[in-house]
Image (cartoon, helix red, strand yellow):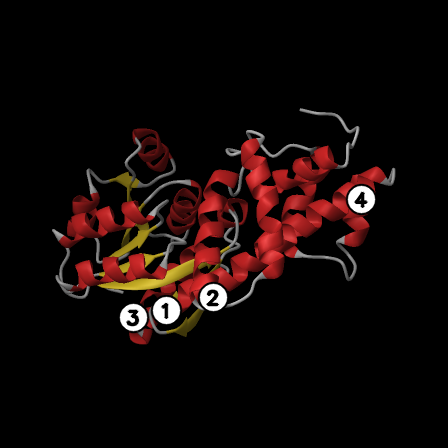
Amino acid sequence: MESKAIGMIGLGIMGSAMSSNLIRAGFRVLGYDVLPRRRAEHRKAGGSVARSCRDVAKRCDIIVTSLPSSDALLDTAEELSQSSRPNQIVIETSTLPIPVKEAARKRLAARGAILLDCTLSGTGAQARVKDLVVYASGDRKLYRRIAPVLDGFARAHYYVGAFGAGSKVKFVANLLVAIHNVAAAEAMVLAMKSGLDPAMVLKVVADGAGASRMLQVRGPMMVKGDYSDAAMKVQVWQKDMTIIGDYARKIDCPTPLFSASAPFYTAAMAMGHGAEDTGVVCAVLEQMANNPRRRR
């Protein structure tokens, strides 16, 4: 790469974690977020702060975007296109509908910039410790060019095909996360109702055939009954669930277990847990089981 200056647009849970790891890897990270608080936190972490998306486009050859919604991506693409230039690369990491990413790609391509669909597998907590996997799709030569950037914030990265394949692989991965998270919660509630020490159960089950990454990541939250340190907020996860469900219906693919897991996340929202981690589905199941454990 001709420059070690990387732009980062979107400094939320995932974006701030990625930018911090890039800084530790020796990159200069020019960050921008619509929220002043996040920009201040980025500066405190050792990054420099841009005035706008256009400012990032003017100063960086490679830009990473981590955005919360379709509108945010389209608005960002429009603003970037006003200052983008040929061969500029935008690494788009958000979980969003593929047609939205295609629209953003076209807006940038009009100025010669290239959007790559590079989705992430991992929670915010995993992102902080560089335990992310990237599913990269788009121009393969450009994937090889951005590999050092991906190495800066991810444990592993894979080229999975033409543009959009990264999102499709992410849908598959998140379908499993949705199911495994509820399965872990169901198992932990069974342990609690059985009078077993949940910490002991987590330790021994996680070392056996019943282990899963979600049990490993969210099991400790379920043991404590504390979901306040959200690696993935329920209200954000609902967006991902909707995208996956819509995509599966579009291609006429049945997803019975995924569909069965959805009501527990909806119930968590209804119970006022929207800002908490998705592991809070354990609290939903505890209430259904009339579990007498302490309440926060």
Task: Tell me if 39 is positioned left or right of 219 in this view.
Answer: left
Crowding at mark 4 (Cα within 10 Å: few <14, some 14-19, many 20+): some
Kind of residue indicated by mark 4 = Leu
Residue 242 locus on image (x, y percent): 46, 51
Number of the front mark, 3 or 4 = 4
Residue 80 locus on image (x, y percent): 18, 51
According to the image, label 1 marks what residue?
A: 137
Number of the front mark, 2 or 3 = 2
Query: Residue shown at 44%/41% (left/top)?
Result: 13
Mark-to-mark CA distance, 3 and 1: 10 Å
Residue 135 in sight from this viewpoint: no
Kind of residue indicated by mark 3 = Leu
Q: Nearer the viewer, residue 166 or 240?
A: 240
According to the image, label 2 marks what residue?
A: 169
Query: Residue shown at 40%/42% (left/top)?
Result: 16
According to the image, label 3 marks what residue?
A: 142
Quadrant in which residue 272 is drawn: top right
| Quadrant location, the C terminus | top right
Task: Tell me if 170 is positioned left or right of 66 in this view.
Answer: right
